[in-house]
Amino acid sequence: MRKILFASSEVHPLVKTGGLADVSGSLPIALREQGEDVRIIMPAYRQCLSALKDLKTIATFKFDGYYMPIDILQTTLPGTDVILWLVHSPHHFDRDGGPYGKPTGGDWEDNAARFSLFSRAIAALAMDEANQGWKPDLLHCNDWQTGLAPALLSDQEDRPATIFTIHNLAYQGLYPREVFDALDLPVSLWHPEGIEFYDLMSFMKGGLIYADHITTVSPTYAEEICTYEFGYGLEGLLTKRAKETRLTGILNGIDNDEWDPSHDPHLAKSFSVKTIRNKLANKTALQQQFGLPDKEDVLLMGLVSRLVSQKGIDLTLTAVTNLLQEGANVQLVCLGSGEPSYEQDLRVLRARFPDKVALHIGYSEAIAHQIEAGSDVFLMPSRFEPCGLNQLYSLRYGTLPIVRNTGGLADSIVDASDENRQQGTATGFKFELSTALALQQTIQDAIDLFERPRIWRKLVVTAMESDFSWQKSAEKYIELYEQL
Ligand code: ADP
Ligand code: GLC
């Protein structure tokens, strides 16, 4: 049994802004089921402190660069016996708002101090400085918020092997030199082959340079980040690490219990491949809930997303406007929050087509499940998508994803081309170019096929039967742990 410390800045069901939380709340459990001894470490946000009981203080640390000591609290992840360590620094984490941003919007000004502190705590626990008699063989870090941990460990003797998983290269944790100095980090880290990135400090580079191995969340994204278009200037470094065989793409899995249309408390009616007809009750319920005409023959399109440029929201806005102006028989139900300009554009779209477009600006687990269940197709026209989880949830709920052919979308969806349909492998609709026209044409293809119920039903069955449970992906991580 290997000991693995899994570090993440968000973990479902405690704190979530996106797919990282889903992965951090389910991969450790899958690893655990395959016999690994896994513990999770995350910051003790206010949401964690109020949701969790029986918190036991197991250690206190005072780190360089910080005035106040911090505690490490121990409990278990709700509903599991996986040990969870919380980095408790009230000044940094016990506040209203999100893990990265203020309740009123915008990032916290002290994010560098918050996640540098988190990384210092991860490194300390990875060396068992808390004297728990549990020193991991492997430290598995995720995204920039944990990036300094591999860097801080790099010169330690007897350190665990380190893996750094990139969930999204677009967020790197870049700060000016003054911030680096204020954090009292080892000066030896400041050079171009260290965490310096064109005169800025890069948390992400801490992981990319110093981890023994880098993974990212799909094979296609692993290739894409080695190119100028997707590499943000890090493509040279990533190509080098790929050549050293130190960069691997492993597709995310999903939690099949949490996302199960036959046992989902949020749904109007349960359904499975054997009772697909019951999916319709969810479509009707969704239309009624959102005040749309409850018609069966209209193609209901779902969208659940952070409203940011990555997700191609502007493409959706243009494509849907054009289709509705042409009188297409479609409806759109949209759940999301993010950039105010996208929120506003969506409100305007709804005002223009009130019986076609419905909108909930905000965050709601229940509505996310209801949209997955009630829609006919799910829109993910992402400019880039490291993995994407919603298209996997969609497959399981018999909702055909309409996706751009990038990253994990490319790796998980089989286009409904004539050939793929004949072979019985098609599960959704794919397009290449990041343009509204390409999306619009693909939605039109879906409308056309939707008018052929037998063909549509076959696609839905194939989608629902595809398997993206964690088991296969967890095995790939375990193989990698083995090598390291
Ligand atoms: P990303 O992590 O880039 O946002 P993913 O597709 O990997 O994209 O994961 C997004 C996760 O966040 C999914 O579980 C999705 O259901 C959820 N999600 C996104 N926006 C909302 C929202 N407004 N309300 C509820 N869940 C949301
Ligand atoms: C990121 C990516 C998303 C991925 C998720 C979990 O948020 O944007 O594509 O699914 O991480 O790995």
Image (tube, grey):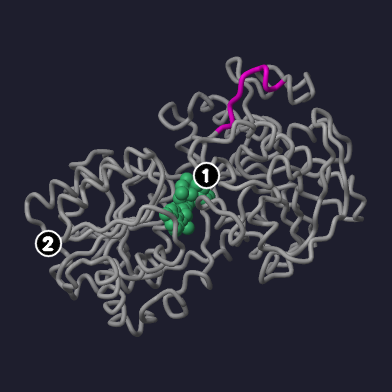
Q: Are marks 2 and 1 in contact (CB under 8 Å)?
A: no
- Considering only order in the chain, which callout, 1 or 2, is on the residue closer to the N terminus? 1
Nearest-to-viewer mark from 2 and 1: 1
What residue do we see at 30% from left, 54% from top? 379
Picture quadrant where residue 477 is located: bottom right
Q: In the displayed structure, does residue 193 sit left or right of residue 173?
A: right
- Camera-side residue: 322 or 346? 346
- For mark 2, does the 10 Å Cα neighbourhood hold few (<14), some (14 to 19), or many (20 or more) residues? some
Viewer-nearest residue: 130 or 451: 130
| Mark linked to residue 103 | 1
Q: Residue drawn 39% across and 76% down?
A: 267
- Asked if residue 109 is positioned above or below residue 74 in the image, the reply reads above
Determine the residue positioned at 92% across, 55% down: 133
Q: Amino acid at mark 1?
A: Pro
- Callout 1 environment at 10 Å: few (<14), some (14 to 19), or many (20+)? few
Span colored in magenta: 172-180
**Is the shortest distance between ligand 1 and the CB of mark 1 under 8 Å?**
no
Extreme top residue here? Answer: 199
In space, the residues marked 2 and 1 are separated at their CA atoms by: 39 Å
- Relative to 115, does residue 180 appear above or below in the rendering? above
Any atom of ligand 1 within 8 Å of the CB at mark 2? no
Decide if residue 389 is in sight here: no
Q: Which secondary structure, mark 1?
A: loop
User: Which disc is residue 329 wearing?
Assistant: 2
Furthest-bottom residue in this view: 274
Of residues 47 and 422, the one nearer the viewer is: 47
The amino acid type, in three-letter code, at marker 2 is: Asn
Q: Looking at the figure, which quarter contains the N terminus?
A: bottom right
**Which residue occupies the foreground of this view, 73 or 131?**
73
Q: Residue 328: where, in percent of width, then height?
A: 10, 57
**In the shown orientation, is residue 24 left or right of residue 322?**
right
